[in-house]
Image (cartoon, helix red, strand yellow):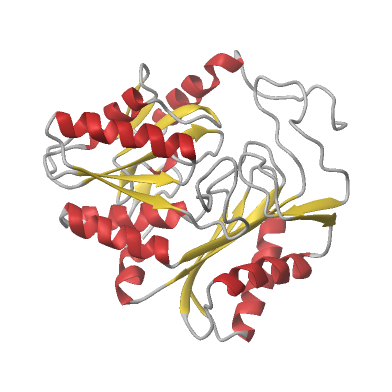
Amino acid sequence: LKRGSKMRKIMNNPKLIVSEMLKGLSYVDEKLEYFSEEEVIARKKVGQCKVGVVSGGGAGHEPAHAGYVGEGMLDAAVAGNVFASPDPIRVLKGIKEADTGKGVLLIIKNYSGDIMNFSMAKELAEMEGIKVEIVVVKDDVAVEDSEHSDGRRGIAGTVFVHKIAGAMAERGASLEEVKRVAQKTIDNIRTMGVSLSSCTLPSAEKENFVLEEKMMEIGMGIHGEKGIHRGELVSSKEIAKILLKHIMEDYDYSNSEVALLVNGLGSTPLMELYVLNNDVRNLLKEKSITVKENLVGNYMTALDMFGCSVTLLKLDSELESLLKDKCDTVAMKRRG
């Protein structure tokens, strides 16, 4: 299929694609409930009293965020339209579905629309007597500022925050403790990505911009935001060196224990992600960095974009223990 020609997608009406996607996802796990009016996926309430953990944002990043709803991770996920933040009323519904009386933590990626709408929902929930706290993920080392965010963007590292905060909540911790470990995780995460193509919105007939054949863009955002360098495509070993160089210049992980996520952006074959994972692991070994947890796959995508990102999370005994706790979600089935 040539770039610029009409794209092929398995869908019905582009205007209904988010609703139909969430409905289809809800069938995979009988412990999930789908609220069509607000586009919320939530765990069915079974009498458990715990801190609720809620995340969300624009659709198009599947399996994020609805794929992480379940035991040991999120209690609810709120979807907006493709690459568009959900409105405060949708977020409020997610908060209410997650609330069991011990408060709710909102995990937000650092985009202006998400910050505004989730913050407004927090105020609405507090007016109804629900205690709500917020943490903001900003793991992308490619930028300090962009037109889409105040400071760094939140990208694939968000998955680690979901997992660790969710595990802490599942243990019965207080809202303050769940927020503490979530923020601790955020402080120790860095991510850098590379894109080999643009992506195509469901309502569009061609890519929203063109990245020429045999070219790559370092640091492109998960909505197609401009990166920091565009050049010729290089080998996996060279890509690993480039991504880790940017990460290590921002946060020195030398001689530490880490969790590693090699994340696909939607269209990159697993074969290629595993090749990159091998190259990253070899480089980390040279730097005396010990990988205690290694995830490879599509965890935070950008529709059909070719490309990937590398995320490192520095671990201590607390974070490692929480990361290894059991979770059971559509995207991380029976992990732990």
Residue 66, can we see it? no
Instruction: Give residue 181's quadrant in the image.
Output: bottom left
| In this rendering, position of residue 110 left or right of residue 125 | right
Q: Quadrant of the C terminus?
A: bottom left
Residue 234: percent from left, percent from top? 83, 62
Q: Position of residue 21 (x, y in %)?
A: 50, 26
Q: Residue at x 66, y 19 (%)?
A: 203
Q: At x 64% / y 42%, what residue is drawn?
A: 266
Position in image of residue 51 (x %, y %): 19, 47
In the picture, measured across the screen, residue 116 lies left or right of residue 140, that is left
Which quadrant of the structure image shows residue 231?
bottom right
| Residue displayed at 85% across by 31% down | 1
Tell me which residue sits at (60%, 83%) in the image: 285
Number of numbered discs on residues: 0
Image position of 26 with respect to 295: above or below? above
Measured along the vertical axis of the image, is residue 82 above or below residue 313? above
- Whole-percent x, y for residue 312 in the image: 52, 67
